[in-house]
Image (tube, rainbow, N blue to C red):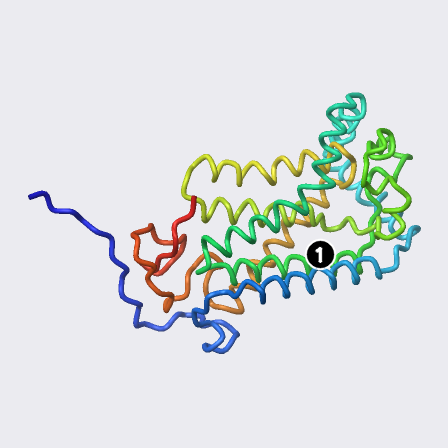
Amino acid sequence: MVATQTWRAAPAPTRRRRFPGLLPRRLLRWRRPVWWQEIAIIAVGYWLYSLVRNAIPEQASIATRHARSIQHVQDALHLNFERSFNHVVATNEWLAQILNYYYATLHFIVTPAVMVWLFVRRSHVYRGVRTVLVTTTLVALAGFALYPLAPPRLMPEFAYVDTLVKFHTWGSLASPAVAQHSNQYAAMPSLHIGWALWAGIAIFACARHRWVKALGLAYPLATLVVIVGTANHFLLDAVGGALAVTLGFGVQYALSGRGAFTAPIDAPDFGEPDPPLPGAHGGVRGPSVD
């Protein structure tokens, strides 16, 4: 008879963590997320985000002055290749339209899709990863308020081409009906990059198959190409978005005392063997992820 080896969950560690987290222990215990509560939280959160973002004074003159400063810094750092790439995109309508619609749509499709995926397939880490996303968004809102910034496409003095206007992309900020309800000077940090990095890291950390992990890594890189090619953001805006995500993970760790992708030590055993979650304590496992 051939002996079969089964993977078993390791017992919870008895030693105390070096940093227990700022939240009370009772709030850090395992609780399965409830779908209607999560929908309500997300809906209210997005409504507040839209309300606050669009209520921030646009301050066009200040935003334009900040844009000049950002451009000068990028020139000094020899990061002015984005203007050349923008011109390449602007001379190829098919490419510009693909990038424009990517910018206008995937930002609002991929992020909630990843949240649903985590809720269903990685409920052990869902709350921690959601905290990272919420914190990232709040950091971005603070950036919009404290540092209004005009995007490159609104700075014709630097020879950027507004591909949204040139090719009349449907549903974009080039439409007056859309632009009048949105703060066009909320560019620093780039929330497109912030959310894309959040989604990409979550996919890479939680997916099982390598090709899915590769898609997770490719998504924020593709988003970077899009925001530069369409002149919706400076490269330094993308750096700001990456810093916002980093702060999001830092705040999540400070609150819980564990990494965003580490399952609570009292999480239940779901039956079928599955590899430990990234950073988990020796053997806490969750449902499989495809």
Q: Reply above or below: 101 against 11.
A: above
- Which residue: 33% across, 51% down? 274
Q: Reply above or below: 149 against 86.
A: below
Estimate the x, y position of residue 70 in percent, counting from the top left.
Answer: 79, 44
- Which residue: 45% across, 69% down? 31
Residue 44, picture quadrant:
bottom right
Q: Mark 1: which secondary structure?
A: helix
Q: Which of 87 and 93 is in front in this view?
A: 93
Estimate the x, y position of residue 92 in percent, counting from the top left.
Answer: 77, 21
Residue 248, picture quadrant:
bottom right
Residue placed under numbered mark 1 in the picture: 140
Q: Reply above or below: 8 against 196.
A: below
Which residue lies most toward the top here?
A: 92
Residue 38, picture quadrant:
bottom right
Q: Determine crowd level at label 1: few under 14, some 14-19, many 20+ residues with C-alpha closer than 10 A.
A: many
Q: In which quarter of the image is the C terminus?
A: top left
**Residue 265 relative to residue 54: left or right:** left
- Which residue: 49% across, 36% down? 214
Q: In which quarter of the image is the N terminus?
A: top left
The kind of residue on which mark 1 rests is Ala
Estimate the x, y position of residue 121 in percent, counting from the top left.
Answer: 45, 53
**Number of numbered discs present?**
1
Which residue lies most toward the left here?
A: 1
**Residue 243 relative to residue 66: left or right:** left
Which residue lies most toward the front here?
A: 36
Estimate the x, y position of residue 88 in percent, counting from the top left.
Answer: 76, 23
Q: Which of 100 and 188 is in front in this view?
A: 100
Q: Nearer the viewer, residue 171 or 93?
A: 171
